[in-house]
């Protein structure tokens, strides 16, 4: 990861306002603002659109992990067959 300029938390609002103004003037998305003190990043301010995209990708990755785990667990069978094997009415599960 590249080293980013850290903005102290007390200066976060000012840094945000400056970055949004620069982004609007340059017709671009605002860049992330890295917040922290000393040499450690404690938080990152990102544009809402980017955050939504990141969350969507995380959801996709979680779903892919679940599908992979399910497939590696072995053969699956239709729910109505499982219901019937448990003595339940399979028509309720089709």
Image (tube, grey):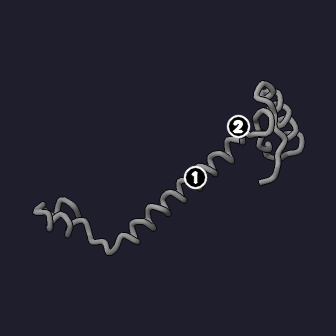
Q: Position of residue 27 (x, y in %)?
A: 85, 45
Q: Position of residue 76 (x, y in %)?
A: 31, 71
The residue tagged with tag 2: helix, strand or loop?
A: strand
Decide: is 42 above or below 10. Answer: below
Residue 42's tag is 2
Q: Examine the image and state in which quarter residue 9 appears.
A: top right
Decide: is 32 above or below 75. Answer: above
Foreground: disc 1 or disc 2: 2
Q: Earlier in the sequence, mark 1 or mark 2?
A: 2
Q: Examine the image and state in which quarter residue 75 appears.
A: bottom left
- Which residue appears at 18% of the width and 63% of the height? 83
Relative side of 85 to 49, left or right: left
The residue tagged with tag 1: helix, strand or loop?
A: helix
Q: How many marks?
A: 2
Q: Which quadrant would the C terminus be assigned to in this image?
A: bottom left
Q: Position of residue 1 (x, y in %)?
A: 77, 54
- Which residue appears at 59% of the width and 56% of the height? 57
- Within 10 angstroms of label 1, few (less than 14), some, or many (20 or more) residues? few
- Cα–Cα gap, marks 1 and 2: 23 Å
The one nearer the camera, 42 or 20, is 42
- Within 10 angstroms of label 2, few (less than 14), some, or many (20 or more) residues? few
- Residue farthest toward the top in the current orientation of the protein: 10
Q: Examine the image and state in which quarter residue 31 appears.
A: top right
Decide: is 74 above or below 33. Answer: below
Residue 56's tag is 1
- Residue farthest toward the bottom in the current orientation of the protein: 75
């Amino acid at each position: 990861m590249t080293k980013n300029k850290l903005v102290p938390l007390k200066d976060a609002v000012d840094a945000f306002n400056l970055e949004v103004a620069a982004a609007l003037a340059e017709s671009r998305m605002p860049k992330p603002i890295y917040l922290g003190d000393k040499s450690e990043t404690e938080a990152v301010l990102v544009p809402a659109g980017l955050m939504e995209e990141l969350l969507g990708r995380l959801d996709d990755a979680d779903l892919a992990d679940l599908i992979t785990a399910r497939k590696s667990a072995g053969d699956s069978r239709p729910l109505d067959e499982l219901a019937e094997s448990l003595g339940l009415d399979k028509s309720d599960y089709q």
